[in-house]
Image: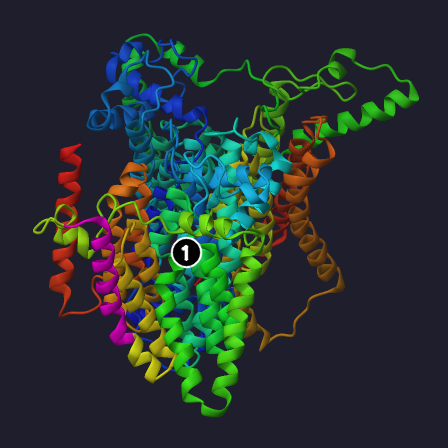
């Protein structure tokens, strides 16, 4: 198929509104370019967002984790249970109430959001969130409600943050802006976990991107509030904190006169934000420590199931878990994580630059994922966020990482019976970006990865 | 871009696998089972399931072919007594067959749009995408479950041959199509007239006169008869023709379907309802049996309280009268363009006045109409009104809240892309013309344009009412029929209006204007 004749009309009435000749090579770029030429350019974001809803909603029609699987169900039940819990149990019992049944183990902001969702849901049908009796409650309507709550929160927080991010990041390249929004919003891993498996990761990721956006536009204080909120929604966003800390600290040190004032401002902001978020639980030391113990359970082991990280990989050769006590392992992993984070953070601290910040975020989240303690396979969404944001800067590595990340979650999603949407949106994403054909040199690697995937899938099918 | 379209649409359709399935899914599963495990002689007698085989024999053979591959997925679906069987493998298999069978539509579209060297590649892509991803087809085939995409593929193939000038193949394809699904009989009059005048009558040396060609008539007749024999022959030999036909044409159904299709009878019934209210005030005598049934319109006889009762033959006569009107012009000038428009008008007449019309039949009008939608601005606006009202009338098919998001998103995306896409092409054309002639848009046409726009934006309010407001006002479930009623009446106005609009263009338009096929 010739590229230019497809997009330029013979009558020549289309005036390309782009400044430079785009290298049209992937379907997504081809279409968005075509939209621009058909004077539909202004609609392209609307079209992208609508298509995003279409994909997410259809993925959401599939089973969620633990659907129809008593007695414990899955993550969906955890989220639903927290809505029930926060709605009926007094606030000072939230982190104590029947911990055996999906006890609350996320920071308070999740609890507050759950409370709001529970309130709204109860207006439709109080049965969905009746205390205790609603455990394992499943109905088509309640599923619909829960699914739409994820979608609405994502479209309120994550989606606008990505649009703003791309706007800043590609400020100089007018026509290209439309492409990464599509790629980032159709990132398969996040869609499958949030709308298939069922979680609210996009809220935490969205808040993180908002904090980046604020840093970009020099609203450092507001940015740090946004990041504190992300931390308050899901403690997992600690993975990002070294990079953000290094960036802000570096900025404080660099600007000698105002730096100190900024430092104080940021410090006070962070303390106040956390104080407000944790306020209801600050009545006693025992209470706040219970909250923190719930958030960071150190007694669970080095890793769960099969995680694509260092400890799980090395386990094939060295059985670390049998060699050391758990507290020794904790220390080893902490040390390894710090070692992996330090170089990039020091570099960022010395040169607090906005582009560097995103790369450092990716590195620090990856370091946590690879080396830290008690990592879940879904945590790969954290490094995946900054890496996906770099989709146009590093098309090869970004898509590579996303494919590997998705690949690593296959067992989890297979358990959730999400095989069909898994392959559909995975292939769709890769096809839209033509990621496989993109670079010539490492394409050998890429093919190896694909072959591995196919072999893996076949073996998985056989072994079941 | 066409390659992109086929890949992209496959992803879009695969995503719809877990959506709601209507009873038509079980219908087709049952037919798979019947054709696979029973001898041909039993196909049209089997009645263990209530969903008996009621499509013509070619469709039965189509199911037979599909059933040969079914054991690859799940053998259990092929047991006739395994009613309402829905394993994952069965669902995937049947849904996949819909996607694969739609390749016929894709091929037909490609053939149709590339004949006569359509130069405007941009428009070609828009039209191809707008038909191949028509929300009507997505809703009816890929969610609700049917094989319309495949059937419309054969239909477009026959049109492509006609456009090419290969009338014989056009006739043959249409005969094949009739043996797949007999609803296309509604379009037969236009085919008959066109093939007779354009194929069987030959131009003579004298300008403007035509001579009947026995040779062509013979060719066409024999090929059509052969196709019908291939299809019905085995059943004629077995002496089952009567049984087959009684399955194909069940006349025991009522005037309107469970939900009123947005046609003339919907307005007629609504009128009757309104009159009842007045009559009660004024104390007229009423047909009491008609008032009692709140479930009016359900399958069965429909009684009218005040207006005259409608019988099946009344609807046929009305349909034929309106079809005749369009055929007269076709008889006089059997050009391809006139053929296409009279096909559309035939579809309209049968949809608006037919007996027991299903709302899905709107595709019979919409698909051929989209082929001429980009020819000029007048046709485009008629098409737009039809598309909006026709697609909206399909919404009640997906009555569950879960699918509401999908149907709204699909339609919005399609409206934006198709309408804006076609419009940007038309505007360019118009701008070129404007250079030479002054714009002669009168005040009247401006007013009409505004009213049309208001009508179309009204659908937003209608959706708001049927989707949200109605449930809030009548929490106790009072007036459950109100959303359906208002949908069907509001849509009926749009469909009828677009029909009148097209008729006016067709009958009053100059012929040379009609020649202006998208060049």
- Whether residue A8 is visible here, answered yes or no, is no
Q: Give the range drawn in magenta.
A: A324-344
In the image, residue A43 lies in the stretch drawn in magenta: no
Residue in front for this viewpoint, A25 or B191: A25
Q: Give the overall secondary structure of the magenta segment.
A: helix
Residue in front for this viewpoint, A405 or B486: A405
State the image coordinates of residue B477 (x, y, percent, origin top left): 69, 26
Residue in front for this viewpoint, A191 or B90: A191
Query: Considering the numbered disc 1 on the image, is that residue within a helix, a strand or a loop?
Result: helix
* Total numbered labels: 1
Q: Which residue is at 72% across, 54% downward?
A: B451
- Within-10-Å neighbours for mark 1: few <14, some 14–19, many 20+: some
Instruction: Tell me the quadrant of the picture where the N terminus of chain B can be found.
Output: bottom left
State the image coordinates of residue A155 (x, y, percent, origin top left): 51, 56
- Whether residue A256 is visible here, answered yes or no, is yes
Q: Mark 1 points at which residue?
A: A235
Q: What's the image's color scheme?
A: rainbow
């Amino acid at each position: 198929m010739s590229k230019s004749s497809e997009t330029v009309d013979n009558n020549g009435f289309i005036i390309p509104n782009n400044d430079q000749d785009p290298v049209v090579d992937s379907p997504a770029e081809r279409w968005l370019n075509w939209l621009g030429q058909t004077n539909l350019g202004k609609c392209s974001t609307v079209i992208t967002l609508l298509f995003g809803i279409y994909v997410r909603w259809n993925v959401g029609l599939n089973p969620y984790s633990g659907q129809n699987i008593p007695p414990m169900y899955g993550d969906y039940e955890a989220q639903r249970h927290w809505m029930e819990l926060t709605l009926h149990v007094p606030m000072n019992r939230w982190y104590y109430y029947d911990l055996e049944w999906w006890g609350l183990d996320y920071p308070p902001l999740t609890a507050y959001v759950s409370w709001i969702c529970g309130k709204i849901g109860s207006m439709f049908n109080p049965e969905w969130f009746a205390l205790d009796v609603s455990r394992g409650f499943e109905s088509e309507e309640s599923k619909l409600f829960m699914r739409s709550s994820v979608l609405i929160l994502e479209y309120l927080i994550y989606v606008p943050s990505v649009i703003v991010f791309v706007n800043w990041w590609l400020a100089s390249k007018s026509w290209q802006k439309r492409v990464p929004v599509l790629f980032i919003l159709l990132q398969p891993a996040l869609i499958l976990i949030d709308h298939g498996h069922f979680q609210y990761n996009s809220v935490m990721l969205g808040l993180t991107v908002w904090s980046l956006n604020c840093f970009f536009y020099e609203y450092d204080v507001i940015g740090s509030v946004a990041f504190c909120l992300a931390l308050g929604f899901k403690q997992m966003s600690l993975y990002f904190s070294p990079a953000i800390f290094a960036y802000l600290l570096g900025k404080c040190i660099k600007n000698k006169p105002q730096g100190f004032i900024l430092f104080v401002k940021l410090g006070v902001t962070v303390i106040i934000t956390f104080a407000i978020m944790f306020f209801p639980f600050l009545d006693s030391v025992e209470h706040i420590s219970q909250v923190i113990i719930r958030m960071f359970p150190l007694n669970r082991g080095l890793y769960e199931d099969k995680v694509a990280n260092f400890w799980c990989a090395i386990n094939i050769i060295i059985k670390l878990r049998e060699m050391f006590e758990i507290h020794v392992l904790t220390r080893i992993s902490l040390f390894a994580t710090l070692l992996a984070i330090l170089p990039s953070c020091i570099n960022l601290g010395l040169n607090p630059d906005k582009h560097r910040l995103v790369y450092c975020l990716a590195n620090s989240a990856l370091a946590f994922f690879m080396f830290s303690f008690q990592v879940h396979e879904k945590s790969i969404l954290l490094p995946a966020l900054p890496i996906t944001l770099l989709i146009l800067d590093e098309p090869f590595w970004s898509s590579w990482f996303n494919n590997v990340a998705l690949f690593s979650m296959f067992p989890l999603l297979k358990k959730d019976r999400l095989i069909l949407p898994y392959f559909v949106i995975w292939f769709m994403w890769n096809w839209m970006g033509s990621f496989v054909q993109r670079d010539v040199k490492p394409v050998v690697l890429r093919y190896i990865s694909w072959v591995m995937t196919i072999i893996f899938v076949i073996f998985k099918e056989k072994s079941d | 871009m066409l390659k992109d379209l086929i890949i992209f649409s496959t992803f879009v359709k695969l995503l719809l696998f877990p959506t709601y399935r209507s009873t038509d899914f079980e219908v087709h599963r049952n037919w798979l089972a019947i054709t696979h495990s029973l001898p041909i002689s039993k196909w049209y007698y089997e009645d263990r399931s209530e969903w008996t085989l009621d499509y013509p024999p070619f469709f039965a053979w189509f199911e037979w072919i599909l059933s040969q591959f079914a054991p690859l997925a799940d053998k259990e679906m092929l047991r006739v007594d395994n009613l309402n069987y829905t394993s994952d493998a069965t669902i995937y298999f049947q849904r996949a067959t819909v996607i694969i069978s739609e390749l016929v539509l894709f091929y037909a579209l490609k053939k149709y749009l590339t004949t006569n060297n359509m130069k405007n590649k941009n428009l070609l892509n828009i039209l191809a995408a707008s038909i191949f991803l028509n929300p009507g087809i997505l809703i009816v085939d890929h969610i609700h479950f049917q094989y319309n995409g495949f059937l419309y593929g054969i239909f477009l193939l026959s049109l492509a041959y006609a456009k090419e000038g290969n009338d014989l193949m056009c006739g043959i394809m249409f005969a094949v199509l009739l043996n797949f699904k007999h609803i296309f009989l509604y379009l037969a009059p236009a085919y008959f007239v066109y093939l007779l005048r354009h194929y069987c009558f030959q131009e003579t040396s004298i300008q403007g006169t035509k001579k009947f060609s026995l040779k062509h008539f013979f060719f066409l007749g024999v090929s059509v008869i052969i196709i019908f024999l291939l299809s019905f022959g085995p059943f004629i030999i077995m002496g089952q023709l009567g049984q087959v036909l009684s399955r194909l044409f069940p006349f025991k159904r009522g005037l309107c379907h469970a939900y009123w299709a947005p046609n003339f009878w919907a307005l007629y019934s609504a009128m009757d309802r309104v009159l009842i209210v007045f009559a009660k005030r004024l104390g007229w005598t009423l047909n009491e049996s008609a008032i009692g049934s709140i479930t009016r319109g359900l399958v069965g006889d429909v009684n009218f309280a005040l207006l005259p009762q409608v019988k099946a033959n009344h609807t046929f006569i009305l349909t034929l009268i309106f079809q005749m009107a369009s055929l007269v012009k076709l008889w006089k000038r059997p050009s391809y363009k006139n053929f296409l428009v009279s096909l559309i008008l035939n579809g309209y007449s049968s949809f608006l006045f037919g007996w027991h019309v299903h709302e899905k039949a709107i595709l019979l009008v919409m698909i051929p109409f989209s082929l001429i939608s980009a020819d000029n601005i007048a046709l485009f606006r008629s098409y737009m009104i039809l598309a909006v009202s026709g697609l909206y009338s399909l919404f009640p098919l997906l009555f569950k809240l879960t699918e509401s998001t999908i149907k709204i998103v699909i339609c919005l995306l399609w409206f934006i892309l198709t309408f804006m896409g076609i419009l940007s092409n038309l505007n360019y054309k118009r701008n070129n013309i404007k250079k030479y002639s002054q714009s002669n848009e009168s005040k009247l046409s401006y007013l009409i344009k505004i009213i049309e726009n208001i009508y179309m934006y009204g659908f937003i309010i209608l959706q708001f009412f049927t989707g949200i407001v109605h449930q809030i006002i009548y929490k106790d479930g009072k007036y459950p029929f109100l959303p359906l009623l208002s949908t069907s009446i509001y849509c009926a106005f749009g469909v009828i209006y677009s029909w009148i609009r097209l008729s006016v263009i067709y009958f009053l338009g100059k012929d040379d204007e009609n020649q202006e096929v998208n060049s």
